[in-house]
Image (cartoon, grey):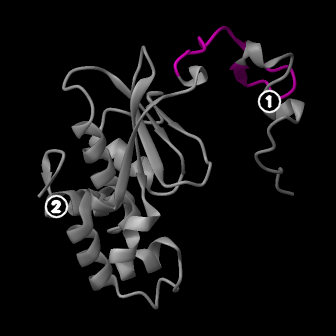
């Protein structure tokens, strides 16, 4: 059993090193990324879209050249455990998702996915076994074409110094940076 170029054990070890522990969501995500690649052309440059910020982006970053930092991975939190790998130019690609009907055959995996028990109440060994045995078999696959906003790259544009905080920001954001304009509240100064 391979997850991209890794054995299952090698991938689990990478997950632990990268994510901090053997997260079931990242391991399942590994199977999802692998499955997506089986439905894509062998050659090409692909971007990635994750429909959740939880665990799945880490699997994408571990197994593809797509990262949040290089801009090839976009995370849009619509709350679904799904990813899309798509051609950078055409937007055509493959969406892989956890098919909830297929979870019926894997009770501990279903319990984990739907949070039917607390983490402490779950049987971690059984969950791990079921993830390994189920693999990508719990997933659905669809050919898709992503929305145009994911294909069109906005050029970075000119930078300026915000007159209020005196830090650099994209001038296209307006006369003040987003934080100083109140459009993005990140924190409150401590007293």
The C terminus, quarter of image: bottom right
Q: Position of residue 127 (x, y in %)?
A: 32, 79
Residues at marks 1 and 2 touching, judged by CB atoms closer than 8 Å: no
The residue to which callout 1 is attached is: 178
What residue is shown at x 39% (from left), y 70% (from top)? 103
Q: Residue furthest bottom?
A: 121
Q: How many marks?
A: 2
Is 162 inside the magenta-drawn segment? yes
User: Above or below — where is 118 with respect to 40?
Assistant: below
User: Above or below — where is 123 with respect to 23?
Assistant: below
Query: Is disc 2 surrounded by few (<14), some (14 to 19) or many (20+) residues within 10 Å?
Result: some
The residue to which callout 2 is attached is: 8
What residue is shown at x 83% (from left), y 51% (from top)? 188
Query: Is disc 1 surrounded by few (<14), some (14 to 19) or many (20+) residues within 10 Å?
Result: some
Q: Nearer the viewer, residue 93 or 45?
A: 93
The segment highlighted magenta reads 151-169
Dominant SS in magenta: loop
Q: CA distance from mark 1 to mark 2?
A: 44 Å
Q: Is 40 positioned to the left or the right of 155 in the image?
A: left
């Amino acid at each position: 059993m391979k997850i991209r170029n890794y054995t299952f054990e090698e991938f689990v070890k990478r997950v632990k090193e990268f994510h901090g522990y053997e997260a079931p969501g990242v391991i399942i995500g590994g199977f999802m990324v692998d499955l997506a690649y089986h439905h894509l052309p062998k050659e090409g440059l692909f971007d990635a879209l994750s429909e959740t910020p939880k665990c799945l982006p880490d699997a994408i970053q571990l197994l593809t050249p797509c990262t949040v930092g290089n801009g090839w991975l976009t995370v849009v939190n619509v709350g679904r455990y799904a990813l899309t790998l798509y051609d950078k130019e055409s937007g055509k690609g493959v969406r892989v998702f956890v098919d909830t009907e297929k979870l019926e055959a894997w009770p501990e995996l279903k319990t984990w996915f739907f949070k039917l028990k607390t983490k402490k109440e779950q049987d971690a060994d059984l969950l791990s076994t079921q993830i390994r045995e189920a693999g990508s078999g719990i997933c659905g696959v669809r050919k898709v074409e992503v929305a145009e906003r994911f294909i069109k790259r906005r050029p970075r544009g000119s930078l300026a110094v915000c007159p209020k905080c005196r830090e650099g920001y994209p001038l296209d954001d307006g006369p003040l940076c987003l934080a100083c304009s109140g459009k993005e509240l990140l924190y409150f100064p401590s007293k």
